[in-house]
Image (cartoon, rainbow, N blue to C red):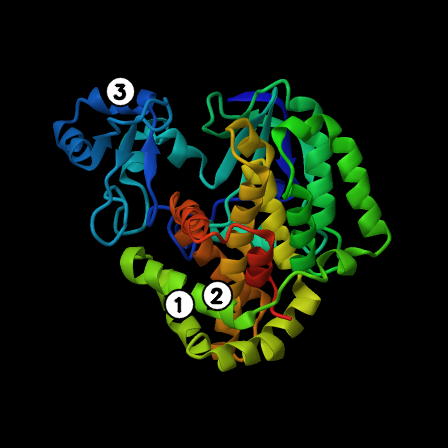
Amino acid sequence: MTKSFYNSANYMKDFQCLGDTCEDTCCQGWYVDIDKKTFVKYKRIPDKKLKRRLHMHIRRNKMKTSFSDYATIKFPKGGFCPFLNTEKLCSIQLELGPTYLSRTCATYPRQYNMVFDRHELTGACSCPEVARLVLLNRDGIRITEERELLPADPVIDNLLDDPDLEPSFEYIRHFVLDVLQHRTISIEDRLLVLGSFFADFSYEKLSRIKKRIKDYRDILDRDAVAELVAELPIEPDVQFAYFRQTIETHVQSYVSNQRYLELVDLCRQGWETHDRFTTAYHSYYRPFMIEHEYMMENYLVNHVLSQLFPIAGIEKGKEPFNEWMLMVLHYTTAKYHLIALSASQQGLTPDLVVRMMQSYARTYEHDISYFSNEIKHLQEDGLTTLPFMSILLKNE
């Protein structure tokens, strides 16, 4: 561990793992990468019985080339890590000590990014305690400078190192965060402002970014957002049909997380019919969000920070508008669950929203292919447009 300056989401200073008192387990429902250094250590363990267990459940990633995902823990049917004991504790750590944990297991739910020359720390909402710290923060999320011990070799989730992007990074990030935290307009309109901003934005136009940001800040300052989004369509029946089909298909084919499945059973009562879903939106979801919209704002802000939106995508050659659509799908899919859940529960509470959002994050954000596949399907149907994203976003 080394002591150094780094940037951190402000809630992370309050994070402490709950251990075996946590209501969920870190060790189910996702792929756990094993870095090469840890894999080699496992090969050299003298305990033959434990070595056989490790060999049985850990597989080399033959098609991978990076250091961090050199191998993968093979989860059995049911989705639990094979090294989890009956008390929901890691047998590798108990038998070999914390130095034998992979870098992923040692750092989760912490997410480390390298932003040019500085580490940046956020947390994953798939962890119940992080979800509480993120979603219940009424004052909002911000980045602060810290100086504490950092792992000597942390897993880097996202890396920014293109010097051509560095001058524009802070301008773009500050603008995106300012829009998402602009509480005089709805979350949906905030996202549509960003969608309009990124609709014809490309890497080649980064040199003109200051002018473009100024133009859109003027729209916010003049309270002209309603005019900007006025012509965008609202089709609740199309929205309802899209999400009911895509979510049910995914749940029935791929999902094994019991905590999430229990909540989906409640959600099904809400998406049984379009009329019931619409009633739930107006009677329960919208009244709750008038007082608690900061919860979904914080979810989106955390997404921007943890994913280095949209610059990390630009550095990989992705279009910013596509990165924006991915963020919209993250938000709208979660929103659909919450509206449906509010129907069965005849309302929402902050604790219920945290529980749903944490289970949702475990299921969808740990599935690296779900949202990218949805974007591909929309592209095939010619629906990767601002108007269709408006249909997915707006209920009124």
Depth check: 269 or 295 in front? Answer: 269
Which badge, 2 or 3, comes first in the chain's sequence? 3
Say which residue appears at 47% left-offset and 52% top-offset. 382
> Label 3: which residue?
40
Q: Is residue 160 above or below residue 192?
A: above
> Label 1: which residue?
264
Say which residue appears at 55% left-offset and 77% top-offset. 278
Image label count: 3
Say which residue appears at 28% left-offset and 58% top-offset. 253
Q: Secondary structure at mark 1?
A: helix
Question: Which quadrant of the figure contains the C terminus?
Answer: bottom right
Crowd rating for badge 2 (residues with CA inside 10 Å; few <14, some 14–19, many 20+): many
Look at the numbered discs 2 and 1 and tell me whether their residues touch, using CB distance below 8 Å: yes
Q: Position of residue 58 (x, y in %)?
A: 22, 33
> Label 2: which residue?
337
Q: Position of residue 394 (x, y in %)?
A: 61, 64
Q: Secondary structure at mark 2?
A: helix
Crowd rating for badge 1 (residues with CA inside 10 Å; few <14, some 14–19, many 20+): many
Which badge, 1 or 3, comes first in the chain's sequence? 3
Look at the numbered discs 1 and 3 and tell me whether their residues touch, using CB distance below 8 Å: no
Disc 3 marks a residue whose amino acid type is Val
The part of the image, by quadrant, that contains residue 176 is top right
Left or right for 291, reference 152: right
